[in-house]
Image: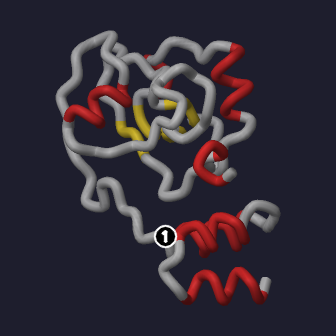
Amino acid sequence: MAALSKAATGNDADAIQNEIKNIDKETQEFAARRMDRDLCPDGAVLEAKEGEIILDVALRNGIDIEHACDKSCACTTCHCIVREGFDSLTESTEDEDDMLDKAWGLEPESRLGCQIRMGDEDLVVEIPRYTLNHAREH
């Protein structure tokens, strides 16, 4: 815990990430608040066509969501939480579910942004402030 406190007093995101791998959710949330990266702090309303991939919509509109696996459903860096409209989406695949099991801050409405295709309802999507990028960390 002392190492986390020391890391959280600075602005070194990598040091924070290294310290929060095996700690409880409350402490993880504290550390996430210390991350300097706010992708869309004020929210945004974006237009998307039915069938369009949410990650592509975000990237096209300047919201730089990480996508380490180049949108191939092989990482969790584009983890999103669908706060409204979840039931309008197609079901996640077994591959997506397997990847989501590794995501930080997993919730019942979690999906990978590279796998969410816009349905016929508006969505409210939250981008978690913290993600695990195993390719960058090793």
Residue 33 shows in the view: yes
Residue ID at (30%, 54%):
40
Q: Is residue 91 left or right of residue 115?
A: right
Q: Amino acid at mark 1?
A: Met
**Residue 127, position in %: x, y?**
44, 47
Residue 97 image-quadrant placement = top right
Residue 26 shows in the view: no
Q: Which residue is mark 1?
A: 35
Task: Kindly state the secondary structure of the residue where label 1 is placed.
Answer: loop
Q: Nearer the viewer, residue 135 or 101?
A: 135
**Residue 76, position in %: x, y?**
60, 37
Residue ID at (70%, 66%):
18
Residue 107 image-quadrant placement = top right
Give the number of callouts.
Answer: 1
Q: Nearer the viewer, residue 56 or 13?
A: 13
Residue ID at (64%, 53%):
137
Q: Is residue 119 left or right of residue 20?
A: left
**Residue 103, position in %: x, y?**
66, 42
Check the image and report above or below for 101 versus 72.
below
Residue 42 image-quadrant placement = bottom left
**Residue 2, position in %: x, y?**
77, 89
Q: Residues within 10 Å of mark 1 (few under 14, many from 20)?
A: some
Q: Is residue 134 left or right of residue 51?
A: right
The quadrant in which the N terminus is found is: bottom right
Residue ID at (62%, 72%):
16
